[in-house]
Amino acid sequence: MLYLKLMKNNNIKFGTDGWRAIIAQEFTTDNVARVAYATAKWVKSIDENASVAIGHDCRFAGPLFVETAIKILCQEGVKVFAHKGICATPMLSLACVNYKTTAGIVITASHNPPSYNGFKLKSNYGGPTIPADIAIVESLIPESIEIPKTNLDDFQKQGLLEYVDMETDYFNHVEKNFDMEAIRNSGMVFGYDAMYGAGQNIARRLLPNSLVYLHCEHNPGFDGQAPEPIHKNLLEFSELMKNSSDLHFGFANDGDADRIGCYDGEGNFVDSHHILLLLIHYLYKYKGEKGKVVVSFTVSNKVKKLCEAYGLECIVTPVGFKYICEIMVNDDVLVGGEESGGLAIKGHIPERDGVWIALVLMEFMAKTGKTINELIQEVYEIVGSFEYDRYDLHISEEIKQNVIKNCTEDNYKNFGKYNIVGRETIDGWKYFLNDEDWTMIRASGTEPVLRVYAQSNNRANVIDVLESVKKVLLSE
């Protein structure tokens, strides 16, 4: 038996979306075993016949980490449903519902740099595990655990391990919920950047003749770039969209395909605020669906404005999709989403799903015969036009703490020529500069980064606000 001897400071804590750490430093088979053991104890406390669905994305050593977790879970008497090969997070979450498991595990670090891997927990409703249950799992993590040498074939023979095809399950689920023929026969061609992530197989399978692919091959190092679908990481894709006259719309997914970034046919980035507005507009105005709209604190107030126009209640949560998910599980929610590209809609699982959201937008275009920009103009007629961007500042811990201190003590009265006229502090600090413009400061929950956000009526103003805030913060 392999015995794990841990340093006293090797504590494992879950962030806004799972536990993430650098591979071969903190993220090791030994530590994965510890978390898997705690997960087993937790699910068994809920259900004496506990079961878990498990999968991994494209990152380095995913199969090894999954094998380790399976051994611990099965050793503890937990039935495991596993997918062979890469598995997008939404597929795993759907599997929790399909196979009625107690919980789910995805070995992924989502959009983090390639040196990271992670451990996401899902619950039986097919979405992120709520913070209260995460706290229980953290409390059950042992200082050491023995990893059994038992072969997986033996667990399979005992009925404790069953391999299932989560990709095919997801494919069939899509076919039942979308007018795929309308999309496939629309005459539109779509661009797709998988960012070397786990969405590549299902995207090609769903739209074999309607997609132009980029970075849809195996590369666990993501070509050295963090697989986060934001414009600065998608410049090659932007150029592809701009230079291809026959591409009508493009989308990109992060490493585990639960986030989305989009482009119009001219190679211009369509951020999550605009996607949220489009989802609300399509589902309410065109499809006649209703429900609450739940968004994280970093989302544009334009969403509130559209909700007011449509008579929909808008709820704002702290950053982290788990807070949105908790409301979706217990209430009637039409759309839920984050600034970071994690979006969910009614009629699916309460989970971020980058492929699913792309299909909604493509169906919207196919059904109306309109471009994404024409649909955005429909929304602008209600809420007004706007631009948005964010800076990720990699700064010293000293400066970071000084900024947090000044925000907490309300020391900022202006950022250069921009006077602060209002402030909200649900999660981070959002500063209003006038009726339309705002900026926000927030420390990342998963990376050593300080994020600065800004919205204004044009691109030049957005950059000017960001530069003004950056100048003040870096002078700390």
Image (cartoon, rainbow, N blue to C red):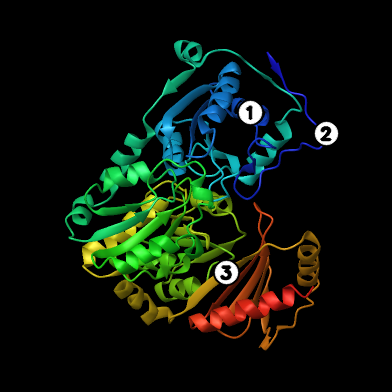
Q: Please say whether residue 345 is visible from this viewpoint.
A: no
Horizontally, residue 303 falls left or right of residue 69, namely: left
Q: Earlier in the sequence, mark 3 or mark 1?
A: 1
Q: Quadrant of the C terminus?
A: bottom right
Q: Residue 469's x, y, as percent? A: 67, 77
**Mark 1 is on which residue type?**
Thr
The amino acid type, in three-letter code, at marker 2 is Lys
Query: Label 2 crowding class (10 Å Cα cut-off): few <14, some 14-19, many 20+?
Result: few
Farthest residue in the bottom direction? Answer: 417
Identify the residue position indicated by label 3 in the image. Answer: 390
Residue drawn at (71%, 31%), measured in percent from left and top?
Answer: 141
Tell me the SS state at disc 1: helix
Amino acid type of the residue tagged 3 in the rendering: Arg
Q: Nearer the viewer, residue 47 or 456?
A: 456
> Mark 2: which secondary structure?
loop
Mark 3 and mark 1: span between their CA atoms?
Answer: 35 Å
Residue on which disc 1 sits? 29
